[in-house]
Image (cartoon, helix red, strand yellow):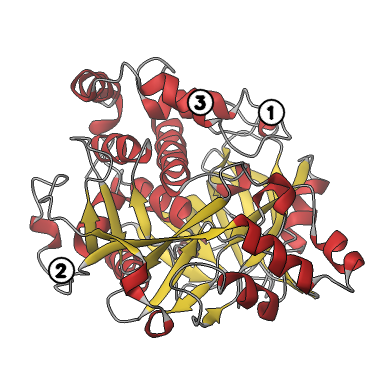
Amino acid sequence: MNNYNKYKVIVIGAGIAGCEAAILCAKMGLKTLIINISMDNPAMLKYSSKLGGAYNDILLKEIEILNGFIPKAILINKIAESNENNRNIAGSYIVDKRNFSLFYKYYMETLDNLETRQGLVVNIEKCNLNEDIRYKVILNDNSMFFTKSIIITTGTFLDANIIWGKNKINAGRHGEINSISFDKNLKNIGYEFKKIKTYISPGIDKKTIDLKKLRKIKSTEQGDLYIDNLEQFKSFKKINTKEKYFAFKTKASIDNLKKAISNIYKNSFNERKNNLNDDNDKLIENTDTYNKNNEIEITLYPEGANTIVLYADGFNSVLSEDKQQILLNQFLGLEDSSITKPGYCIEYDSLNPSQIKNNLESKIHENIFFAGEINGIFSYEEIISQGLIAGINASLKIYENKEFIINKEDSLIGFFIHSLFNKKLNDSKISYSDKENFIKTYDINNVKNKLLNYLKIVNKYFI
């Protein structure tokens, strides 16, 4: 064992939770390694390009107060913004997906105390060589790294499949391999998982859409609500291209969708039955669960400043691409539109949340933390807040053997983390009504003072 492969913290997975955790640990002065199957696209947004909005705008502001990194990434890479929820907190933002990821990549590669490594983790093992070396992380090429603390943020990749039509491919998302050996390793050392599903909507060629028929949400300049001091980011050039429209909304008659689905499955009832699963209420093709107002709405979001592809948020489907195309063409203005990327389902192993404490540390192994979609299906902001809290706790435990736990009454992040451990294993999300009830009496200034008070124990370690 050499010094080059010894770290204070190793983060496994470089999605938005893993990147947030790794950056936080490095900025708290700890030698940190982040490992990912591909280091070409860290913090890649797998769903829409939208951040913020109802409820999540509050989380973004709290993440900023807690020294989170993503507000800077939004500020540099936003291409549209809107105060669609009439909040004076954070608003909603569309970012350029590719530039957003590249921004994280360059920042992490140039950040002191942080190293990046492309590789597939297959095993973690206890080693207890000394107080500073508790675990060994092994890659599929038998490379080994040693650490005191591990943060696991593997997202939707553990024993994952992607599904659309008759296609079922071993992958954590389209074009990227899944993680099977590490999933088996975690199960062998005592962790319990449940298969859950999340959905990626299709991409649509903007030039094939009749935009005149769509309801448009204009992009509105809100100013920079986040960062007072951008000196450290002066070398990063903001995206100058701005989208005129924040989003496009369109709708379809449920009667028309039912007719199209009936024609699709006229002689294929068994195929339809096989496509409907235990999450079928989310699927565009399951007309049995549609509401009574006889129409369904989807929202189209720009993917970036240098692409004309629009993400069809709300169009969840496990049908084959040709059948998705038929249903998409039932929507107003999309009668002649073309799919560039089919939608699909990701089925993956999610950790039983009863196995982790409310500081996101494992109840089974000390100094192992879990954050992000491995704990269930969440919004971007909920995923990021977990990475942030896991990073703070991993760092603070190394320095002082203390926990950083926000009371559920003191902030939305505190409420969310608490709710995570009190939901049933079969629940994939915190209920919307619970969120709404919490924010009825929300006061951002009061919350800010409370969070800054929590941070007193942490701030002395930031460099």
Tags 1 and 2 touching, CB below 8 Å: no
* Image vertical order of residue 276 relative to residue 405, above or below: below
Q: Which residue is mark 3?
A: 433
Q: Nearer the viewer, residue 19 or 274?
A: 274
Q: Say what amino acid the circle numbered 3 marks.
A: Ser
| Rendered-image quadrant of the C terminus | top left
| Residue 255: x %, y % from top left | 65, 58
Residue nearest the viewer, comparing 235 with 340:
340
| Separation of residues labelled 2 and 3 (CA atoms) | 37 Å
Residue 18 seen: yes
- Image quarter of residue 351: top right
**What type is the residue that disc 2 sits on?**
Lys
Q: Position of residue 355 (x, y in %)?
A: 69, 31
Query: Mark 1 falls on what kind of element?
Result: helix
Check residue 146 in the rendering and tell me which mark sits there, or answer none.
none
- Mark 3, Cα crowd under 10 Å, few <14 / some 14-19 / many 20+, is few
Label 1 belongs to which residue? 354
For the point 49% across and 69% down, which residue is it?
117
1 or 2: tag closer to the N-terminus: 2
Q: Position of residue 329 (x, y in %)?
A: 56, 74
For residue 403, say whether it is visible: no
In the image shown, does 178 or 121 lie closer to the viewer? 178
Q: Amino acid at mark 1?
A: Ser
Residue on which disc 2 sits: 238
State the separation of the CA atoms marked 3 and 1.
22 Å
